Image (tube, coloured by chain):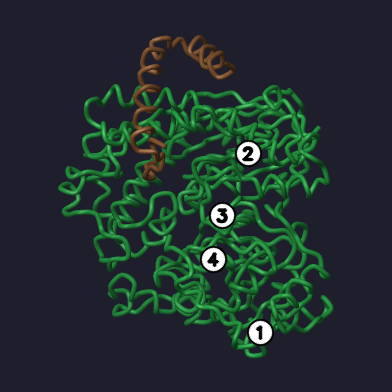
Chain colours: A green, B brown
Amino acid sequence: MYILGISAFYHDSAAALIRDGQILAAAQEERFTRKKHDSGFPQNACRYCLEEAEIAAKDLSHVAFYDKPFIKFERLVETYLTFAPRGFTSFRMALPLWIKEKLFQKRMLAKELKKLDGGREIDWAPRLLFAEHHLSHAASAFFPSPFKDAVVLTMDGVGEWATTSACFGNGNCLEILREMHFPHSLGLLYSAFTYYTGFKVNSGEYKLMGLAPYGEPRFARLILDRLMDLKEDGTFRLDQQYFDYCTGLTMTNAAFDTLFEGPARKPEERLTQKEMDIAASIQAVTEEIVLRLTRSLAAEARSENLCLAGGVALNCVANGKVLRDARFKNIWIQPAAGDAGGAVGAALAAHHLHLRQPKAAVAGQDAMQGAYLGPSFDQPQIEDALRRAGAKFHLLDEDELIPAVAGHLAEGRAVGWFQGRMEFGPRALGARSILGDPRSASMQKVLNLKVKYRESFRPFAPAVLREDLSDWFEIDSDSPYMLLVAEVSKKRQRSMSTHESQLFGIDKLNVPRSDIPAVTHVDYSARIQTVHAQTNPRFHALLTAFKAQTGCPVIVNTSFNVRGEPIVCTPADAFRCFMGTEIEILAIGNCILKKDEQNPGLKLDYKNAFDLD
Amino acid sequence: MDFLSEFFSFMKQRKKFWLLPLFIMFVLLGGLVILTKGSVIAPFIYAVF
């Protein structure tokens, strides 16, 4: 029995296909359309899922959508009634969109699904199911987890009404324990500060998180005292006099500006210590809220396992704190914790909750298959694509390819790494990655400014062999999805001199702080990906070869894209990105490309090719 | 028709029949805005769209 899950019409549209509860394929639409955070119906992603399973749309027993538009509309109306006559402008702008499109989502979905099957007349209405937004998140966290039972915590901006929900999952049941409702939302609070510090809402949140270690949390007390009433169990209410998102077209208002000593930073304006302190403050508050929530849930002693999903679960610094807090024995986080993951959740909710099918036997491994659920290309397809693009390449056996790439990395070159199935979710996990040598003190700056064309303060993440994890980092838990932050091992750290520690904000970045400075943040933290031979044998082999050559089992792993560009999907996307940046080597399938051997006429101006995110 | 019966079921299930007059008013108001402006392009605000 095939079920297609769809998340769409808000941001990060995606599709996922399951067969008898097993996830066969999942992909975000942005990877195909090359439009970051594409919110349209995921026509390409759906088509890919069907192709992967070699079925047609008519073979789908159900299509599950990840939220309930009528209940969203109810929230919209009730919110306006609560605040009226304030908010008329935003109401006037929202209304046509709802009346023309969003209220008729069932009809819209049926129309799009018809296109998938070459216009065949299928009555989709009885096959269409709608899961609540937070239930989709919770299902995406619990059902693929390696646990028989677990407490499930989902936190995001807002779905229908829920902004935070706590569930208990057991077998094929998922019981909602309690919820926090709009407008009191941790996701929206974080987004308000994302907006205030000049980053884009819904895409700049992780920049704010990366900025936090440069600052001091001097505004944390102010946030806790004035913006919210935080209870011991982690629930809270936000004082709406400081926010504009219920009635206006921005996240914060003039009262917020007065409270935080000035107007919001404009996008691309120079970052000052104030923004860093704001980032540190909201990060500290977020961690406090998440810890109070998880502690109160742990106190109920329903399960020793915790599952997390929702956009806030991408805050890997907070996740690391929850892990170290050790109130739960095991933690599992859905790798596509944002709305894209809702597609997987909706499909699994349909299978387990609607059709009452049992949860698959737990074998110690999760069901996300390393998140390698996207398209792959075989060697002839890769060679054909490269030839058509005019690329010059060397063909190597795997035995030659792995040590050759490890050698290039060891010599300090930036390597594009395109292998196997594309990742599902926001992180590149060694299938569509740019790799570098973490021992190089200049690698972080070079990759940020010459390869990724992004802000110089942004940290990079290490991929490390699981078996060497605790030798290099202060953690000994699997983190295959780069969703946990921990310190670089004390013995690998290099303490800063008095002069160095007094450096201001981003200047600290240039001070080598460990044996692997390119992946060590200014507070010695690192966003870790553990690499496992079972889920990505080729990437594991590369790390092993790099370790054999250098003694270091760690590699810089960043997504294969530039700022504002979706992660590459096809060999042609990879070659374009290679030719538009200062990536020196591209390893794609068994082909190796060297930049200095390529036709200079194929170079692209990639720096300004994408809208800044 | 399908839409109307689904919307009716929704109001019944959620016990929110008071939404009906508002809904009718919104359809008229929304239709008017669409007719006069001819566009449904809206800014990206988290809570509203």
Q: Mark 2 or mark 1, which is nearer to you?
A: 2
Q: Residue at 27% across / 35% down in the picture?
A: A89
Task: Return the chain for callout 2.
Answer: A
**Mark 3 and mark 1 residues within 8 Å of each other at the beta carbon:** no
Which of the two discs, 3 and 1, labels the residue nearer the N terminus?
1
* Disc number placed over residue A461 in the picture, else none: 4
Report which residue position mark 2 lands on.
Answer: A6
Q: Residue at 37% across / 12% down in the picture?
A: B21
Report which residue position mark 1 lands on.
Answer: A408
**Which element carries disc 4, helix, strand or loop?**
strand
Q: Mark 4 or mark 3, which is nearer to you?
A: 3
**Which element carries disc 1, helix, strand or loop?**
helix
Three-letter amino acid code at disc 2? Ile
Q: Position of residue B42 (x, y in %)?
A: 38, 42
**Disc 4 versus disc 2: distance between alpha carbons?**
30 Å
Q: Position of residue A120 (x, y in %)?
A: 76, 34
Which of the two discs, 4 and 2, labels the residue nearer the N terminus?
2
Which of the two discs, 3 and 2, labels the residue nearer the N terminus?
2
Q: Which residue is at the front of the view, B34 or A314?
A: B34
Residue A517 visible in image: no
Three-letter amino acid code at disc 3? Pro
Q: Mark 3 or mark 1, which is nearer to you?
A: 3
* Disc number placed over residue A426 in the picture, else none: 3
Residue A509 visible in image: yes
Quick one: label 1, few (<14), some, or many (20+) residues within 10 Å?
A: some
**Disc 4 versus disc 1: distance between alpha carbons?**
19 Å
Q: Mark 3 or mark 2, which is nearer to you?
A: 2
Which of the two discs, 2 and 1, labels the residue nearer the N terminus?
2
Q: Do the residues at pointers 4 and 2 share their chain? A: yes
